[in-house]
Amino acid sequence: MTIAENILVLKKQLPEKVRLVAVSKTKPVSALMEAYQVGQRMFGENKALEMVSKQAVMPEDVEWHFIGHLQTNKVKVIAPFVACIHSVDSLRLLCEIDKEARKCGRNISCLLQFYIASEETKFGLDLDEAMELLGSEIFSALQNITITGVMGMATFTDDMDQVRNEFRSLRIIFNRLKTAFFQDQPTFREISMGMSDDFQVAVEEGSTMVRIGSTIFGARILQKSMSS
């Protein structure tokens, strides 16, 4: 099937409340435009410089989501336009985002990334670290970021029971944080979890935002250039 057909099939499978981030990392602008032509507006990239190069030539109404591990020295290049950063895993990074957002006169939506998998290659906070971050005076002083939810990546495995349990743990974390810090803030509503191989389980466990790449665009093309 074509990229456009893949998008349309996926959107029929997703409940209305679940939004689709088309993970377009390594893909050419022509591929993104095929998705754009059938109404896709949310695109996810994991390299800051690659995102910048695509943003410069794509239509202005594209909503750019940064989904990879973000180095603090690259925040400034995406701060002028990024809609949401899914991968906030430290107070230091959050402070840098706030600083660069302030320079641009913007408020940037951020998701706290949690380590829910049994793989050492994954990044993320644990619940205690997040509670400490959100309860800190430094966090309370930040004015140009909004924490809109949580993100996590499950273990890459065929064991869907394990994947389900990991997604369920992220939903529990979301509920804990909502109760403790965001009870009166409707903007704290996102649970970003689920990719091509496991998004259906993620949706069943409460995902509000799935990040899907290969099911839409085909296998990932490896690149050596454009560091994150």
Image (spheres, rainbow, N blue to C red):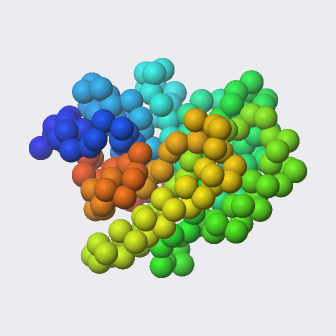
Residue 221, placed above or below residue 121 = above
Is residue 83 positioned above or below 203 on the image? above
Name the spot of residue 71 as percent of width and height, x first: 67, 55
- 105 and 14: which one is in front? 14
Marker count (numbered): 0
Q: Nearer the viewer, residue 153 or 180?
A: 180
- Residue 49 can be seen, yes or no: no
Image point (26%, 31%), residue name: 34
Q: Is residue 101 left or right of residue 119?
A: right
x 65%, y 38%: residue: 184
In the displayed image of the protein, which residue is found farthest to the top? 60
Q: Up-down: is 144 above or below 211?
A: above
What residue is shown at x 54% (from left), y 78% (from top)? 120
Residue 207: x %, y % from top left: 40, 51
Q: In this rendering, does residue 138 appear at all?
A: yes
* Residue 151: % across, % down: 52, 55
Q: Residue at x 63, y 69 (%)?
A: 126
Q: Residue 77 location, x and y as percent? A: 66, 38
- To which quarter of the image does residue 227 belong? bottom right
The front one of 130 and 48 is: 130
Find residue 33 and report its image quarter.
Answer: top left
Q: Left of 215 or right of it: where is 111?
A: right
Classify residue 33 as left or right of residue 95.
left
Q: Quadrant of the N terminus?
A: top left
